[in-house]
Amino acid sequence: MEKKDIVKILNEISIFYQLKGENFFKIRAYQIAAKALEISEIKLTKNTTLEEIQEIKGIGKSIATQIKTLIDTGKLQIYEDLKKSIPAGLIEMLKIPKLGPKKIKYLYENLNISTVSELEYACLENKLINLPGFGKKTQENILHGIELIKKYKERFLYSEVINQALNIENKLRSFNLIENVSIAGSLRRKKETIKDIDIVASTSNINNAKKIMDFFTSLEEVEEIIAKGETKSSVRLKSGINSDLRLVSTKEYPFALHHFTGSKEHNTAMRAYVKKLSIKMNEYGLFKVNEDGTEEIIETKDKFKTEKDIFSFFKMDYIEPELRENTGEIEASLNKKLPKLIEEKDLNGIFHFHTTFSDGAMTIEQAVKEIKSMGFSYCGITDHSKTAKYAGGIEEEKLDDYFEAIKNVNKKYNDFKVFAGIESDILPDGSLDYDDEILEKFDFVIIAIHSNFNMDKRQMTERIIKAMQNKYSTILSHPTGRLLLARDPYEVDITEIINAAAKYNVDLEINASPFRLDLDWLNCKYAKDKNVKLFINPDAHNLDGLHDYKYGINIARKGWLEKENVANTMSLNEMIEYLKLKKQNKSLPKFNISLTCL
């Protein structure tokens, strides 16, 4: 069991104890232990001793023993017992934004509310308005949270699903009766949220179908078999997500993979194009349509071994799965104008992460070591500014310590640079929460909305644009404020924001946190058209989160972005000069910077 999984379990135990009304010190012990373990540099392996765990400040013998048990067995009885002792509906309620364990416990004990449906009914009956600690506004927030849960029910974040899917794909690939296998559907197209896992496989002998389906449905990840056939089987995994396997012959495989990758809109557009050529295409192959309306199959055995062969047959460039959303990819493919999409290896540094100076669970030194080990040559630290008190935002009197800590880390490395930045809150009137005299001290400034989400569209748009006009604003972070499967974007004219970014020389962020992925891919394409630079940033709060930049790469690719459209593909020397020029002249014209002479 990985460290992050153990941290999650410790935090969940503290929540379960809150729901059960345990004493404060017991709850706090697990919270402190989880934080201490997360921030520690210990690498948990089967060889980790109890004594080594106990050496971590903040972890006592009892919890250390539980951590050791989780390392050795992957299970913890106290955790399982707690989970079983709490009504499942109370745990489900924890998904409702702004409804914490204390309030859930109160509702359960005083109104006997044990499910989300009962809670919704109570809100509609105005039963929460006069309760201590609730009131009309809280009741409205709870109802809105319940609406969000309903809206996003049975959908999963890409990050929650991809490793499960890859694991199943690899197991199927190792099965000797399967010739080809690939993830398909929205997961292959790298959509932000996923409904299920689609997998397409082929076999050279379709008579092996039963054995293949037996293998798939008996995988240890499978909780329940929903349907089982020779060409398609559906299962529910233990994680709660459904997975479908479609089995085809070898010659059908390229067509089936293309068809089941989708999107529906892309497939429809492709069929419309090939129809003009008197050809019909579906998941089984290509068919010539005769004048009398009869069809005859176009022999595929030798011509079509991969999807690329299908596109080549129609004199089209290969369309990457991420682009298959019917946003102009077919025309671009025919005209040889598809973009050369950005790749992970193109990034040279990452910006936007939080350390123990605000609400992060890693020191600056820990973060830099991890980022350096990832192969990057620079990073930009951005702890929260003073207004974000809930996140330990840095007060002015502590900024000298912040700058000094960054300076000390920079002294240790000749081949790596830490840029000193801040995530400055955009106040309701559009001003930033530090004076210009302070903002000037940073190498760059990320600006962001963290409060007053309920402004109308015009007010919010004007608020952000005013902040972008500040001469020290470098990057607009998570521009629409959405939290996937939890919070809708705030009302804002994103087109006007992108236009303003071009006008005021402010770069936009693709916030790569799997919970945000904001700017979204559709708007990335428009930003590219307006020649606005984008940063792909992880918005990390712990060491694992630093690796989330890869989810931002997915969004950039779906948004047609190329290497030159993303600022943090620059080399270290280019980035030094780029930030310097932006700081000196906010009206700096947009250009593709190339400073290899430095």
Image (tube, helix red, strand yellow):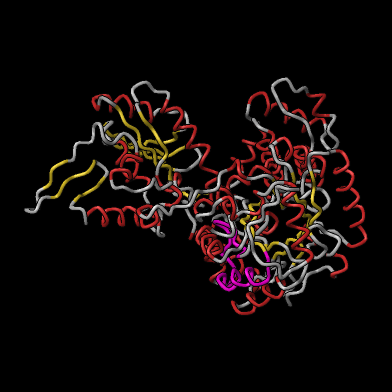
Left or right of residue 532: residue 352: right
Left or right of residue 510: residue 449: right
Q: Position of residue 430 (x, y in %)?
A: 73, 75
Q: Is residue 212 magenta?
A: no
Residue at (58, 74) in percent of width and height: 496
Counting labels gives: 0
Residue at (35, 57) in percent of width and height: 265
**Residue 387 in sight:** yes
In the rendered image, the vertical position of residue 299 relative to residue 538, given as above or below: above
| Residue at the limit of the structure toward the front, as seen here | 597
**Residue 127 in sight:** no
User: Magenta residues?
Assistant: 480-506
Residue at (83, 65) in percent of width and height: 439
In the rendered image, the vertical position of residue 21 relative to residue 448, given as above or below: above
Asked which quadrant contains residue 383, the reply is bottom right
| Residue at the limit of the structure toward the left, as seen here | 292
In the rendered image, the vertical position of residue 64 relative to residue 268, given as above or below: above
Q: Position of residue 542 (x, y in %)?
A: 72, 44
Q: Nearer the viewer, residue 133 or 550?
A: 550
Q: Position of residue 592 (x, y in %)?
A: 63, 57
Q: Nearer the viewer, residue 304 or 64?
A: 304
Q: Is residue 505 magenta?
A: yes
Asked which quadrant contains residue 8, the reply is top right
Q: Position of residue 136 (x, y in %)?
A: 64, 74
Quadrant occupied by the N terminus:
top right
Residue at (67, 39) in percent of width and height: 9
